[in-house]
Image: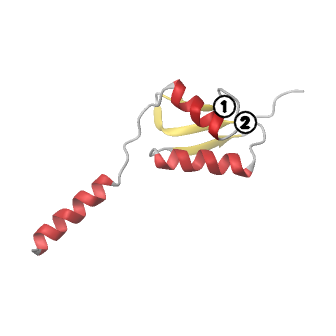
């Protein structure tokens, strides 16, 4: 194999590892929400910032944070955890 072919193969491999962020459906986000032990509606993806996955929860557990972060990274998204203090 020539050097040129090796470089081309490496370039194709590198590009295939990239995931382009996309806007996920409400059903997809709800499925992840249930897998990670969150309430429906606590994962949000906004059209203006497709690369961000917002998790809005008062006190997420470390396991919930890891679950959301892993799914986000597998799908080319950046997980953002928003802490909200709800009035009692």
Q: Is residue 72 left or right of residue 85?
A: left
Residue 39 position in % (x across, y down) = 70, 30
Task: List the residue tagged with mark 2.
Answer: 57
Residue 74 position in % (x across, y down) = 47, 48
Look at the image and tell me in which quarter the C terminus lies. Answer: top right
Task: List the residue tagged with mark 1.
Answer: 42
Q: Secondary structure at mark 2?
A: loop
Residue 63 position in % (x across, y down) = 70, 50
Q: Secondary structure at mark 1?
A: loop
Residue at 65% across / 26% down in the picture? 41
Label 1 crowd bin: few (<14), some (14–19), many (20+), radius 10 Å: some
Instruction: Identify which residue, 85 or 40, lies in the foreground.
Output: 40
Disc with the residue nearer the chain's start (2 vs 1): 1
Residue at 48% across / 44% down in the picture? 77
Real-space CA distance between mark 2 and mark 1, rounded to the nearest whole angstrom: 6 Å
Residue at 66% across / 31% down in the picture? 42
Q: Is residue 75 left or right of residue 37?
A: left
| Residue 22, image quadrant | top left
């Amino acid at each position: 194999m020539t050097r040129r072919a090796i470089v081309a193969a490496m370039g194709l491999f590198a590009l295939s590892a990239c995931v382009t962020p996309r806007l996920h459906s409400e059903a997809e986000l709800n499925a992840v929400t249930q897998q990670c032990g969150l309430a429906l509606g606590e994962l949000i993806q906004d059209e203006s910032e497709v690369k961000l996955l917002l998790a809005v929860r008062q006190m997420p557990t470390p396991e919930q944070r890891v679950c959301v972060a892993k799914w986000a990274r597998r799908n080319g998204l950046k997980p953002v955890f928003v802490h909200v203090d709800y009035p009692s």
